[in-house]
Image (cartoon, helix red, strand yellow):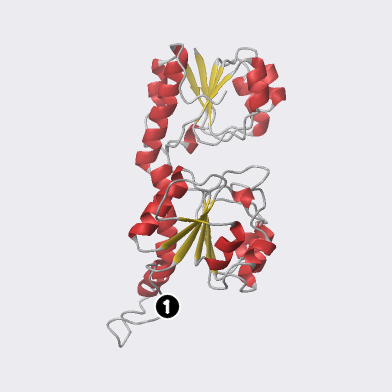
Amino acid sequence: MRIVITEAATVSANDIDLTVFENLGDVTYYDFTAPDELLDRVKDADAVLCNKCVFTKEILQQCKSLKYIGLFATGYNNIDISAAKELGIRVCNAGSYSNDAVIQHTFGLILNYFSKITEYTSFCKRGEWKTSRSFSPIVYSSDEIAGKTIGIVGFGSIGMGVAKIANAFGMRVLTYTRTKKDCSDVEFVDLDTLLKESDIISVHCPLNEQTQGMFNIEAFKKCKKSALFINTARGPVVNEDDLKFALDNDIIAAAAVDVLCKEPMDENCPLFTAKNISITPHSAWSPLTTRKRLVNIVYSNLDAFKNGEKQNVIV
């Protein structure tokens, strides 16, 4: 089997051994693959293992040997699924490999904001604690999250995990989702209610036609002025110009995002200059333990395909 890994550097920073895939075939590794390089690199492959490379119908039609696409990801919107099905190309994703990591990152953003960890660290590193008259200088306005209301948009496995942790912190949990579930510690509400009553709004919904751009200026104007907005889902669920306007004009208090509409960050990304925002570079999914789990799943998926079995099949 001729296997091409198109974006090895997005999975391993020389801290995970990807040569395990050589047990399944002849592997060609590329750290990164630009759109104009993709076809030439994969046109003769039997199997491609990718992350964010876009496989259009036109590209798939020219890959005459391609039988399998394995994603180092849960989402698969970068693959033309209809074309893959038509051409008989198996597509498999990595399921919910990063759930725990994204839940952890979500609360890292929440706790960083309410406990002012970044600000106090900078205060101390500037030497200002050394010159303080107080053993405990109250420089920044921190707060407890116990008793706060968190609104979770999307209630899949990650949203449910965030709710579980929020309950442990003694928070009130609201959720807006298409499918209600049997959860006694969660209040299922409409989106307007969630926006109006939440101190923290945390997004965990998929990106689709219904969710693209759903967080716009009309949505932010329904929020509390003290609200913290968090997005660890997909960048395009947010209108970035509207979020910047909401932050710069004190319509909401703050935001923390791990995803953007264009990644890496575009030179003209409006959020780069927005007030009161924390940005991490789509890193919620990337702890070492998580990436090891990811590689194991992708390997297992391809091994199953090679043995005529189905595992994590999208199409």
Please name the amino acid that badge 1 sits on: Tyr
Residue 158 position in % (x across, y down): 45, 46
Q: Residues within 10 Å of mark 1 (few under 14, many from 20)?
A: few
Whether residue 63 is visible here, answered yes or no, is no
Residue 223 position in % (x across, y down): 59, 67
Q: Is residue 110 left or right of residue 132?
A: right
Which residue is rendered at x = 35% and y = 73% of the image? 124
Question: Which residue is the site of mark 1?
Answer: 140
Residue 131 position in % (x across, y down): 33, 84
Front-lying residue, 180 or 269: 180
The relative height of residue 132 versus residue 264 in the rendered view (above or below) is below
Q: Is residue 165 left or right of residue 6?
A: left
Instruction: Point out the image quarter for the C terminus.
Output: top right
Q: Is residue 313 left or right of residue 219?
A: left
Give the tally of numbered discs: 1
Which residue is rendered at x = 60% and y = 12% of the image? 65
Q: Residue furthest bottom?
A: 133
Front-lying residue, 254 or 10: 254
Which residue is rendered at x = 40% and y = 37% of the image? 291
Whether residue 41 is visible here, answered yes or no, is yes
Residue 37 position in % (x across, y down): 64, 28
Q: Residue furthest right?
A: 58
Front-lying residue, 72 or 213: 213
Secondary element at tag 1: loop
The relative height of residue 80 versus residue 185 in the rendered view (above or below) is above
The relative height of residue 5 versus residue 174 in the rendered view (above or below) is above
